[in-house]
Image: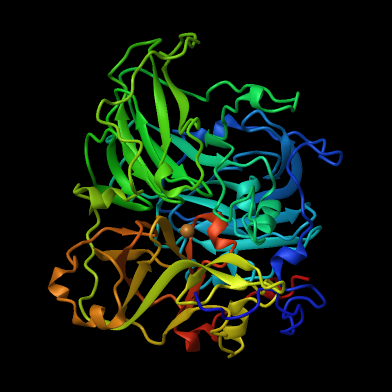
Amino acid sequence: MLLRRSYLNTALAFASLCAFNFPTNIHAAVPIHRGTPSRSAPATKVTNNRAIYTLSSTFVITDVPVTRTFDWTLSLATGAPDGVEREMMVVNGQFPGPLIEANQGDTIIVNVQNDMTTGAGIHWHGITQKGTDWADGVPGVSQCPIPAGSTFTYKFTVADQFGTFWWHSHMGNTMADGLLGPLIIHSPSDPNVRGRDYESERIMILGDWMHDMSDAIIADLLTVNGYHNSVAAPVPDALLINGVGVYNCSSVTDTSCTTQSLPEIDVVPNSSYRIRIINTSSHVHYKFSIDSHPLNITAADDTAISGPKALHQLPIGISQRYDAIIKTTVGTDGSAYYVRAAMCAASIANVPSTYDITALAVLRYVATGSEATTTLPSSTDWSDSVNNDITCYDLDTTGVSMTPLIASNPPTTVVASTVMTSVIGFITNSALEPIAHFFWNSVTWTNYIYKPMLFTLKNGGSLNSSIITHAIFPSTGAADIIINNHDGVIDHPYHLHGNAFYLVSRGSGLLTATEYAALDTSSFNTTNPLRRDTLTISRNSYAIIRIITDNPGVWPLHCHIGWHLAVGKLAAIVVQPAAIQDLSIPAAATAVS
Ligand SMILES: [Cu+2]
């Protein structure tokens, strides 16, 4: 890998637009915490608010828009999702964080009070933020960090979207410290209808967990020896379902470690449930299943689909969502079945042979008026389940049909295209040591968090190609983005902000611009192809996604493995830079300091 620059940039290389005299390198800007119980661990205890996993049947689904206001306090607190206490970052004292539930057309206001000791930014994953780019929540891209002790208000209207989304911190990888939660948008236009296609709704949040704070892990990853002597993203200390993991306390000296009970999901017999599965992990691609309960897949990210009707095992990439309908006609009152989230270990380095790759929860049948049983299930995994794949891959690559229920054909005339090639590499630090980073087209992103790219473009400036690989799509039309995953042994989840995209093609190997231009486009799927916002692209392969460039902005295209993002894996798609200058950005967004 070519060495483009030294990692440590001069702090004041750019005049800041949001604040003065702050270092521009995020890792120099935050104090380093180790997550193991410390003398300074906050006394406040994190709660797991189980109410967020059950969507209320009384929530009125309507096309009459309202404004919904949420008041959030971000704070440090002590929690033990897997039984090992550590310092966490939480919203309103909860992990996972609060549920946002709204209807299509609603305006969402989130008043954020940052009571942490570091800056913050909250991203609304999958929401396109048309005209409200400043609310996209990415420090260094769309805003400055919300300073410790300050408030900031996000306000956006979800005009033309509905489905299963989530929110998470986009500051470093502090989502791995606890700042994440579900975001559900209902709509009368949703082809999947409560009361007809299913009776009730549940949320299942898959995740992964580390015992160290994210900034400590990133600081180590940016050394020659890495974190725990590896420059690879870390093996999770625990795997979580609905914020609960079971850590083997006998392997730690920490006497406060408590063995967790498996999370319980109660269902009534002879009913049907829409389960909204969200993979909030920083590193883990999962295979999700429920013993004896086939999954009828009805949405991929926020796109309602006709999917596989009786799937046993669902591959779900990092930050992807799937909605699945299950029928509770398998058992009777008192029956119990394991819910399994099996880690795709193929893309994670250094997994010990003794590592338990499967997180468990309990699906328990409880008839109305009955007392829940407490015995653990005796159910067994599907006989055809596959846990140890040689790659981690998306559901659409398995030969199943995933047809959007609201049909949309992308334009077949493309006005612009770009090739984005990502690969791991090394750059040399001031001690001439090789430090691992991820690169887009040979450039690893440096986040000047106090000089957001949106503000630069708003002011008529342009981006610096040596610190951010970017493509510029100047006019409205269809544009193709060829994403190459050039890594030989790592599968990555790719997320594009500001746009749902059409998946028009996939292929193996590396696709150059010349090869793309020579492709027989009749092989592209332009007849109602799958639309979504996050794609797993397996090692040494590519995908071609098509967007409509009607949302002016500077939109991150990045790997959603938080540890890869933190070491440079973000590029930008700049849509209609002239129109960005016309965007209105509230003074409060630019005045954060
Ligand atoms: Cu990655």
Q: Is residue 352 left or right of residue 98?
A: left
Identify the residue at image location x=33%, y=11%: 332
Where does the image place residue 187, in percent across and percent down from the top left? 38, 50
Whether 218 is drawn above or below 412: the answer is above
Residue in front for this viewpoint, 389 or 426: 426
Residue in front for this viewpoint, 71 or 82: 82
Q: Quadrant of residue 509?
A: bottom left
Whether 93 is drawn above or below 84: the answer is below
Where does the image place residue 77, in percent across and percent down from the top left? 75, 40
Identify the residue at image location x=27%, y=30%: 294
The C terminus is located in which quarter? bottom right
Identify the residue at image location x=81%, y=58%: 149
Can residue 55 be seen here?
A: no
Q: Is residue 220 left or right of residue 128?
A: right
Identify the residue at image location x=24%, y=79%: 515
Q: Quadrant of residue 121?
A: bottom right
Going by the picture, which residue comes out furthest to the right?
39
